[in-house]
Amino acid sequence: MARTVFFHVGLPKTGTTYLQTILWNNREELLRQGILLPGFGPRQHLWASGVVREEPDLTKRHADAPQAWDVLVDEATAHPGTAVVSHEFFAAASAEQAARAVAALRDAEVHVVLTARDTLSLVTARWQEFVKNGSTVPIDGYPVSEDTDPRDAWDWGSLDVADVLRRWSTAVPPERVHVLTLPKPTEPRETLWLRFAALLGIDTERCDASGSEANESLGVVEVELLRRVNADLTGFTKPLDRGVWIRGYLAQGKLVPRRGEKFWPSPERVDELRARGDRAVDEIAARGYDVIGDLEDLRTPTAVPERRHPSSVTDAELVDVASATIAAMLTDVRQLTQERDRARRSPGRGLDRLDQPKALVKKAARRARRLWRRPQTR
């Protein structure tokens, strides 16, 4: 039976994938230190979050998805040391679902871990991710709803730090709820990993944290172009399709490398998000959670750097970026077609397989999947 389970439940866009990448890259070393990551990989933890949150139609993700939570529980509770469960979509769970999840871990001492950042930068980053996954919602309309439906991991249910902590702290005492703030811009990037590792009792000297990359952002023109393109991508309804092709191939592969200008919501929305963040900081301070880092870093500064709003993007700017993007995509089509033609001419290669439409994009899909899985730090 696991003596301790650290349940890292989010928030999204707060270094979760950065931490998860380091954990999974060092899985064998962590096990030598007595720390288990149950399951086969981060995707199984994603599926498990869907089970806990009672997400409908989980088989659309994968046939094995409905069993994912049971797999993690069985492996974690059979382990004699420490176990770690980590996915940011757990943040959206209701208080009742959180309590059931903790109870399923039986007699283990469960600690809830939440990584957090100021509300303005959080919502801005999460909206961009929403667009990368096919949304057409404008930035000032996100999150779409104040409802905290646990089946929806994109709304306030996974983004309101005070509310997430309120729900999860019904299952464990406040001293076992740990809030890790993101490092200040002036602090080393690895500060978050060192804080997280110290909490879990990980010997970082024996771990390799070099394999985790920063998740670069879309610029204001690029994100507005993608938002508009999404309206025409009506055939991309499956999560895997959206992840591989919209997020991976188009967003990460073609638009992110342009390194465009940063952006904010409207000034009115900035004020709303700042006030919401201030209320959250006050509540966290009053509830007695274990805060690792500076709680004041969760406040949006009174003065923020001036940035454009996506609505300011002109048609001329969109045409420029769209033109360059289409040219890059045509280059990919040419390269893949040439590779297909060379393969057809190669001895011993079956033409029937190469004649299938999927063959033309198979290599591009592999590239896109790699981009889709790239670590996200903020």
Image (tube, rainbow, N blue to C red):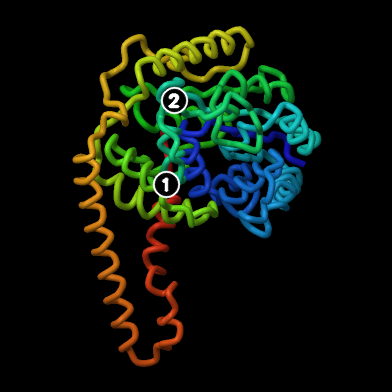
Horizontal and vertical percent for residue 128? Answer: 40, 36
**Image coordinates for residue 162, horizontal then vertical, percent:** 59, 18
- Give residue 182's mark: 2
Question: Could you say whether the residue bearing mark 1 is in a helix, strand or loop?
Answer: loop
- Tag 1–tag 2 contact (CB < 8 Å): no
Camera-side residue: 17 or 242? Answer: 242
- Residue appearing at x 55%, y 22% in the figure: 160
Which residue ends up furthest to the bottom in the rendered image? 347
Q: Residue at x 63, y 55 (%)?
A: 60
Query: Identity of the amino acid at label 2?
Result: Leu
Residue at (41, 63) in percent of width and height: 366
Residue at (53% x, 30% y) in the render? 11
Which residue in the structure is indicated by mark 1? Answer: 231
**In the image, is residue 275 above or below residue 56?**
above
* Most foreground residue, 13 or 289: 13
Residue 111, image x, y percentages: 66, 28
> Which kind of residue does numbered mark 1 sit on?
Ala
Characterize the local packing of mark 1: few (<14), some (14-19) or many (20 or more) Cα atoms within 10 angstroms.
Answer: few
Q: Left or right: where does residue 301 sit relative to residue 338?
A: right
Q: Is residue 205 visible?
A: no
Identify the disc placed on residue 157: none
Under tag 2, what secondary structure? loop
Q: Residue 63, position in %: x, y?
A: 67, 59
- Asked whether residue 248 appears in the rendered view, the answer is yes
Which corner quadrant holds the C terminus?
Answer: top left
Please determine whether, in this image, residue 105 is positioned above or below residue 249: above
